[in-house]
Image (spheres, rainbow, N blue to C red):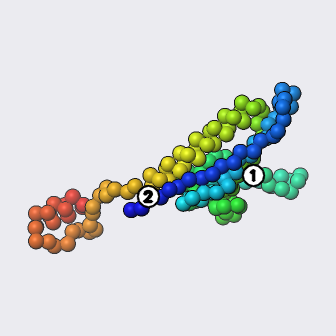
Amino acid sequence: MAVMTRRIHLHRYEMEIQDLHYLGVLRIRIEAVEAEDMDKYVFVYRRLPVNTTTGEADDVFETVASPVDLVEYPVGEPDSNAPMPYFRKDFVDVLLRSAEDATNFWTEVQNQVCRLVTALNKTDDLVLADDSWCPEAPESSSSSSSSSSSSSSA
């Protein structure tokens, strides 16, 4: 089996300011700008209910996707028939309280994205875990292996 070379390229954008001491907020945006042998839409969001005042629904960043999330959650918009309004985007844009929080957030996102790539690579490594016939093994020249096989699968 060919080994896949999965990788994802992230860009980090942040506010360009010299002194955060009195500002109390820092915006950081991380974009998955390209990906090889995998989906770049790795950021999971949850759609909040429509605000009755504004008539708009906000989207809240939840986490970096798992391999299962990549399969289950749609890109761009939540599935209107799904019980939970989760979906995926190729960016995350958040407000944080300090430069330290922003650095920690960036580091954590990088770690989670790297774990996702590692997990996707591990899904390619399958080994035979069981060998079973239903309802029983076919007749073979060796009746002892056939009877032990069919009795163990019953």
Residue at 83% over, 52% down: 51
Proximity of marks 1 and 2: CB atoms separated by less than 8 Å: no
Q: Residue 94: name its quadrant.
A: top right
Q: Residue 110: name its quadrant.
A: top right
Closer to the camera, 124 or 53? 124
Residue at 84% over, 29% down: 19
The mark found on residue 3 in the picture is 2
The picture places residue 45, in percent across and down from the top left corner, at 69, 51
The mark found on residue 59 in the picture is 1
The picture places residue 140, in percent across and down from the top left corner, at 14, 71
* Residue at mark 1 to residue at mark 2: CA–CA distance: 36 Å
The mark total stands at 2
The mark found on residue 42 in the picture is none
Counting residues from the start of the chain, the first of labels 1 and 2 encountered is: 2
Residue at 63% over, 42% down: 109
Whether residue 61 is visible here, answered yes or no, is no
The picture places residue 119, in percent across and down from the top left corner, at 49, 50
Q: Residues within 10 Å of mark 2 (few under 14, many from 20)?
A: few
In the image: residue 69, left or right of residue 134: right
The picture places residue 14, in percent across and down from the top left corner, at 77, 41
Q: Residue furthest right?
A: 53
Mark 1 residue type = Asp
Mark 2 residue type = Val
Q: Residues within 10 Å of mark 1 (few under 14, many from 20)?
A: some
In the image: residue 17, left or right of residue 122: right
